[in-house]
Structures are given as C-alpha cells and as structure tokens.
Image (tube, rainbow, N blue to C red):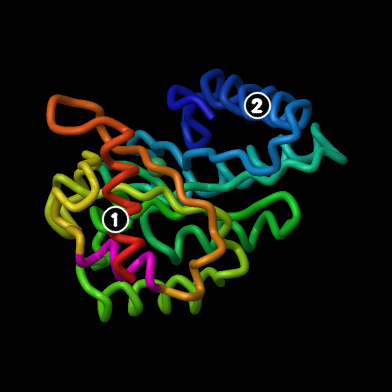
Amino acid sequence: MPYMPNLSSPDEKFYSDSVMVLVREIERASKLGVTNLVAHFGSHMGSSIEEGHSKIISGCRRAISLTEGAKVRILLENSAGVKNSVGSKFEYIRTVLDQINDRNRMGVCLDTCHAFASGYDLRNEEAFKKTIREFDEIIGLDKLFLIHVNDSMGELGRGIDRHEHIGLGKIGDKGFRSLFALQVLRDLPLVLETPIDNRRGDKENLAHVKKLLAAI
Ligand SMILES: [Zn+2]
C-alpha cells in the first residue's frame, strides 16, 4: 500500500480518503491474485494511541466489508515508534487485531528495522528468540505472514525509522543469521527494503543474505 494514506488520521477527510485507498488496493491485489497486502498503522498526529487504534480498527473493518469475498489479507506492519506512530508495540497490534477478529482477512508483517527501533532486541540468537517468543505470546505466530528484512541505522529503542544494508547496521550479521536459523520462521516469505546507494544495491544485499543463509 502507498505510504501517504494514514489509517489512524484524526482528520476525517484524510482518514476516509485513506480507507478508500485501502479498498482500491485490496481490489487491485484481488485482480492480480495477490493474497497479502501490507498496510501501515499510520500516525495519530497527536490525538492519542487509543484514538489511532479506533480509527484503524474501523478503517480495516470497513475495507473488509466493502471487499467482501476478496481473498486478500491486510497485513498490518509494526511501526518504528516514531513520535505519534501507532502499532510499534506487540500489545498494540494485538489490541487492533482482536477488535477486527478476522483471521482470513487480517495478519501481521514484521519489519526487523522497525521492531529494533521500537525496542525489540534482535542482535543475537538469544535476543532474537526472546523477541519472537514475545511476538508469539502476545500476537501469535499464526498471525505472521511476512517479514521485512532490514538492518537499522538507529540504535535499539531510539524510534528511528532508517533502514540500513543487511549486516552494516545496528542489528548486524549476527542478528540476521539468528533470524534465518529460526525454524519457526523458515517458511515465511522475506522482503528486502534496504537502501540503494554507492555502497550496495538490491543485488548485493540479496547476495549478502544468501551468503548468511549458506553459512547456517
Ligand atoms: Zn517495512
């Protein structure tokens, strides 16, 4: 889903336009046979986390009812915990999913950079396992359908949403090796959202991921 819409916006016009973007994206995905659509929690813009939750809950419900029968699941992506953001803690995601209560149409995309930025340590095997255990206890691994694999420029818990090349950021190779080694995540699709600059592009990051995988 595009970045501009804000499903947690307190501005009624912007909010209802955002919900209609979600509806159009679901219809588009459905036509293309795409079964999972990643959407962002958005920003409550200073209203409150609770206000943001109630917006995204009713927005998803509305989009689901307007696209009844579509075999497209909305995956809400955990956010980095930037000021006013919604969806940075597993508890918040659980609250929202519980209220929508539709496993066929709702799920989660876990972004490693965002999780790290909002305080979930992923730097080594022990830390990674602890974070995934927490995810399982609070949200449930059966709700996880996709992982965005990104290293983080910012330190743990700083709320900085800046993606870094795999292994060159604060999560590091050790962290990603731990991710790839985790049996429970083995069958999930992984998507890179790493930068393209004079150090590396997508091809090099993919080669780096393959190198880490080969070493397991
Ligand atoms: Zn992402």
Magenta region: which residues?
174-181
Of residues 111 and 99, the one nearer the viewer is 111
For the N terminus, the image quarter is top right
Numbered marks: total = 2
Q: Secondary structure at mark 1?
A: helix
Location of residue 157 (image quadrant): bottom left
How dense is the environment of label 1, judged by Cα within 10 Å: few (below 14), some, or many (20 and up)?
A: few
Residue at image point 27% right, 56% down = 118
Which residue type does callout 2 highlight?
Glu
Q: Position of residue 191 (x, y in %)?
A: 44, 44
User: Any mark on residue 170, and which?
Assistant: none
| Residue that numbered label 2 is attached to | 25
> On the rendered structure, is 192 left or right of 146?
left
Name the residue at 24% across, 68% down. Answer: 121
Tell me the quadrant of ligand 1: top left
Query: In percent of the image, x 63 and y 63: which residue is there?
Result: 98
87 to the left or right of 26: left
Tell which of 6 and 131 is nearer to you: 131
Residue under label 1: 211
Local SS, label 2: helix
